[in-house]
Image (cartoon, grey):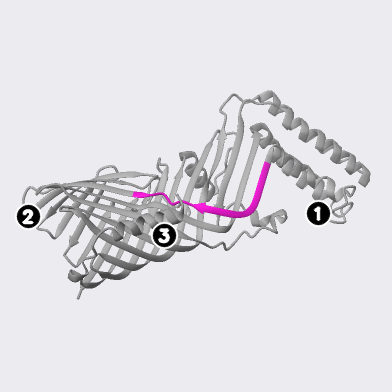
Amino acid sequence: MSRAVVVTIFLTSIMAHDCAFARASWGVYTQIESVTYSEVMSIDGFIDNFSGTLEVGQSALTHDLAEIGVQYGPWRVGRVLRYDYDLAFSYDTALLNYQIERGQILDAMLPRDIELAVEHLRSAGIRVARSFSIRPGLSVEMGLSWLKSQQFYSGSLQVNTNRGALNEEAIARIEGLAPEYKSRVDDIETADDLVVLGDELLQVSADIREVVVTSTLQGVADYYYYEPALREDERDEFSDVALFGPRGEGFTLDVALRWQINARWGMKLDIRDWYSRIVWQNSPATTASFTATQAAIQALDMFDQFVEQDIIRRFSGQFFQATNSENPDDPAAVVPDILAELRTANSSINVRNERFIQKLTSQTRFSTHYTPGSWWAISGYVEDYHTYTFWHVRADFGQWIGVEWYPDVQAFGLELYHRLAKIRLVTDSSDVSSAKYLSLVAAFSWYF
């Protein structure tokens, strides 16, 4: 659906109804809405480099909005600031990050399934909304936001292990190469000897790739970004790619429905970002893939130590007159390339700038309420944030206080409200610093 079509539908729906300006009144309003959830540990721990206690989980999210504006009758125009982050991952991903942040020793032979998907946008802009009545008891509000941004991520990473039996005989064969070639180093007397050894080691690396083990690693990364997350900026071959500072702009469309079915029953439906389109004209993008045997991973560790300690250090002053030499016959260019040749086997990476259209994940809230009397009511809610769906129940008393309970995340909420103002807090812990779920709403309005 093109931008023109969406805007046309929006404007047509507005113009199809009377504005009722004769009964309109001016007002100002401001509101802050925030919901944050971390399934694997406390929110503070998740933000602070995984410093909390790790639990089983597969998602984290935060959606924050601040808006201030004016209202005239059914129209609202305001300035908005937004921060949206949806993160879906496997437990192996969380565990690996947890171990890395603590400096724990990682077992390269341990089967892992690393999966990560992210949708992130920090933005600011203008929002225009209009509410109108379809018939008594049924009303709709449509809101159109024009947003600009310089910070985003959108994409995925997968590293999957084919869990099979390792070829222990092949691993032993590869590990046995180290003593053999260490003894060869002692026989090196000239630069030509070093070149010969380098050629043989290149053949060894080819043999390693031919070793077939039944456990393999396969990885794919495909993402767009405002700054690189995989150290693309540290590689000279991507120096001509603009890796920082893209600019994006576009719109989102929101829809809200209110239906008072009868005197006791009613329902509400709110869909934020029902349709969205953020255009990045010159976005950095990375697509990468690799396939490796786990035996080769062990061999890489061996060759790292072997080349670093037994060749480069020993002969750096004797034969190596330059590093990163452009002369392929220079000994300085032969041995260091062994690891590079190993690491690039069966892998590819493409880093570029291109036009990218980001579509935000929609946020949906549905509720139904029952009002048996004038002083109390009960409601049931379902909130879907793409990576996680919450449900909760609520009871209202005296038209000024609401109490909420989220069974799935064990969170308790309290809201105090008035015709002109409200404040709401929901958390799963009395100590906010250890909370995994935290939601805050504050709103104020004044009419002249």
Amino acid on which the number 3 mark rests in the picture: Tyr
| Secondary structure beneath label 1 | loop
The reply, left or right, for residue 169 in relation to residue 101 is: right
Would you name the residue on which mark 3 appears?
83
Q: How far, Cα to Cα, is label 1 from label 3?
A: 44 Å
The reply, left or right, for residue 246 in relation to residue 212 is: left
The reply, left or right, for residue 391 in relation to residue 202 is: left
Residue 62 visible to an observer of this rendering = yes
Q: What is the x, y in percent for residue 376? A: 9, 52
Residue range of the region highlighted in magenta in the rendering: 348-363
**Lower sequence index among marks 1 and 2:** 1
Quick check: 412 above or below 180? Answer: below
The reply, left or right, for residue 111 in relation to residue 125 is: right
Amino acid on which the number 1 mark rests in the picture: Asn
The label nearer to you, 1 versus 2, is 2
Q: How far, Cα to Cα, is label 1 from label 2?
A: 79 Å
Q: Quadrant of residue 342?
A: top right
| Secondary structure beneath label 3 | strand
**Magenta stretch containing residue 440, yes or no?**
no
Q: What is the x, y in percent for residue 32? A: 31, 64
Q: How far, Cα to Cα, is label 3 from label 2?
A: 37 Å
In this view, the residue in front, 384 or 303, is: 384
Would you name the residue on which mark 1 appears?
324
Q: What is the x, y in percent for residue 41? A: 39, 48
Would you name the residue on which mark 2 appears?
375
**Lower sequence index among marks 3 and 2:** 3
Q: Quadrant of the C terminus?
A: bottom left
Residue drawn at x 23%, y 53% as measured from the top left: 413
